[in-house]
Structures are given as structure tokens and as C-alpha cells.
Image (spheres, rainbow, N blue to C red):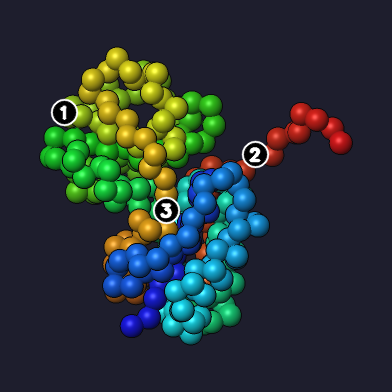
């Protein structure tokens, strides 16, 4: 039985994994800033060598398509597409927000009266986010949203669970709101992609390798460096 190589580069976490039958059997990751250009290819080679997996044993490559870091997504997608072209493998994409819902730290909150909001940091008080129910089904589309203390007043549920790297910066904003729970230390990761990837592989939901692009959500805006060299 072959493996699916998973790649996650939408945040500061550079992560690669090996999925078999929907289970992550091995992974390598490092959350140390945006070092994907230096680390991603090395991590892939190391992962395959350490676990004695030959590239011909791969049956697909899966990539976290975004939203997230423009540079990180470009590096991850170009690497995944390069492997697919070289080995004639299908390409699978999953959403970076959806995979975080599968983190085991959220299991205790998964009751019918709760809503879940994965968040990725955009900038300042803005995040990429969507709303999920306790089964992980989408309640709202993905959006880039500026958050304030009234952002979730219209949600009539028992608890609202915020999580992901974009959620942690709102600890002080919602510290007095007992309805809003913030679960820290949850990042998009290749080890969380297993079941989502397996479902898409089984149903042959493959991307067009030639034309596939990351899901940026917002247009890239270049900024001027503060220091001139």
C-alpha cells in the first residue's frame, strides 16, 4: 500500500508527513518562522529516508492550499507540483482552516451547542476565518475579517471556540466573555491532513497540476521596506 506525501506551509510551521489509509504514520515539522525555502525539500528527503520510503511508493501528493502566507503557500504549492510532475502523481489540496478542526485538543468541545472558528493571522486585527459546527461542517464561507469585541454577538450558541494562530492574539479582547473560548497552540500541520486527504483520494478529487494555484483569498500587497539598503 502506497503513501500520500502531505505538505503544509501556510503558516510559520513547515510540515511534511506520510499518510497511509488516512493515518499520519510519520511527519517532520518545525515552527521557526518562515524558513520553508531552506527546509521544505530537506524535510521531504529526510522523511522519506528515515522511514525507508522510496518515491515510487508514493501514490499522491497533498498540499494545504491556503489561505495563509503568500510566500509559504507559493513555496509549498510549487514543491508539490514539481514532485507530481516528476513522478506523474495526482495532486490533492485541502484547506488550511479545515484541517485544524481535527486537532485532538478540540475534542472535548465538540458538542451540538458549540461553534468552531479556525483563524489564521492576516495582519493587525484581521484574520482568515470560517465558522464550523461540531461535526466540522461549514456554517459560513471563508473570509478575511477584522475582529472586534462585538464580532460574534449574533451567534446564538452555548460556546464559540476560537483556535489557530490567528485566534491567540484575541486573548485580551475576549477575556471577559465567558461564551468565547480560545484554544491555543493549534497550528495547521501535515499530521492533521490524513482523513481529509484520504477522502479526496478515494473520490479522486484531484487538482489540475498544470493550472493549480494557492488559495490566497486576498490579493498580494507589496510593502516598502522601512530600511533602505
- Chain-order first, disc 2 or disc 3: 3
Label 3 crowd (10 A; few <14 / some 14-19 / many >=20): many
Label 2 crowd (10 A; few <14 / some 14-19 / many >=20): few
Q: Mark on residue 209?
A: none
Counting from the top left corner in percent of width and height, residue 27 is at 43, 62
Residue visible at 21% across and 45% down in the picture: 107
- Report which residue position mark 3 lands on: 189
In this picture, residue 217 sits left or right of residue 148: right
- Report which residue position mark 1 lands on: 158
Please, which residue is most extreme toward the front here?
50
* Residue 15 visible here: yes
- Between disc 2 and disc 1, the foreground one is 1
* Residue 206 visible here: no
Question: Gap between marks 2 and 3, in whole Å?
Answer: 26 Å
- Chain-order first, disc 3 or disc 1: 1
- Report which residue position mark 2 lands on: 221
In this picture, residue 22 sits left or right of residue 169: left
Counting from the top left corner in percent of width and height, residue 157 is at 17, 29
Residue visible at 32% across and 30% down in the picture: 182
- Assign a secondary structure to mark 2: loop
- Chain-order first, disc 2 or disc 1: 1
Considering depth in this image, is 11 or 218 the residue closer to the camera? Answer: 11
Amino acid at each position: 500500500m502506497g503513501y500520500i506525501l502531505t505538505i503544509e506551509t501556510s503558516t510559520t510551521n513547515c510540515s511534511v508527513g506520510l499518510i497511509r489509509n488516512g493515518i499520519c504514520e510519520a511527519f517532520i515539522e518545525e515552527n521557526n518562522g518562515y524558513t520553508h525555502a531552506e527546509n521544505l525539500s530537506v524535510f521531504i528527503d529526510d522523511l522519506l529516508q528515515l522511514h525507508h520510503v522510496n518515491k515510487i511508493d508514493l501514490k499522491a501528493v497533498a498540499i494545504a492550499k491556503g489561505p495563509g502566507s503568500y510566500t509559504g503557500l507559493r513555496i509549498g504549492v510549487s514543491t508539490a507540483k514539481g514532485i507530481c510532475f516528476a513522478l506523474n502523481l495526482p495532486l490533492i489540496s485541502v484547506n488550511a482552516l479545515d484541517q485544524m478542526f481535527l486537532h485532538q485538543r478540540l475534542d472535548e468541545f465538540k458538542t451540538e451547542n458549540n461553534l468552531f472558528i479556525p483563524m489564521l493571522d492576516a495582519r493587525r486585527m484581521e484574520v482568515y476565518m470560517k465558522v464550523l459546527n461540531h461535526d466540522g461542517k461549514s456554517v459560513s464561507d471563508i473570509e478575511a475579517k477584522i475582529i472586534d469585541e462585538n464580532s460574534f454577538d449574533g451567534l446564538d450558541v452555548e460556546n464559540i471556540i476560537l483556535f489557530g494562530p490567528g485566534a491567540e492574539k484575541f486573548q485580551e479582547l475576549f477575556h471577559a466573555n465567558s461564551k468565547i473560548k480560545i484554544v491555543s497552540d493549534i497550528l495547521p500541520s501535515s499530521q492533521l491532513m490524513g482523513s481529509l486527504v484520504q477522502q479526496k483520494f478515494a473520490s479522486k478529487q484531484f487538482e489540475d497540476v498544470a493550472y493549480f494555484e494557492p488559495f490566497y483569498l486576498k490579493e498580494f500587497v507589496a510593502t516598502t521596506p522601512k530600511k533602505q539598503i
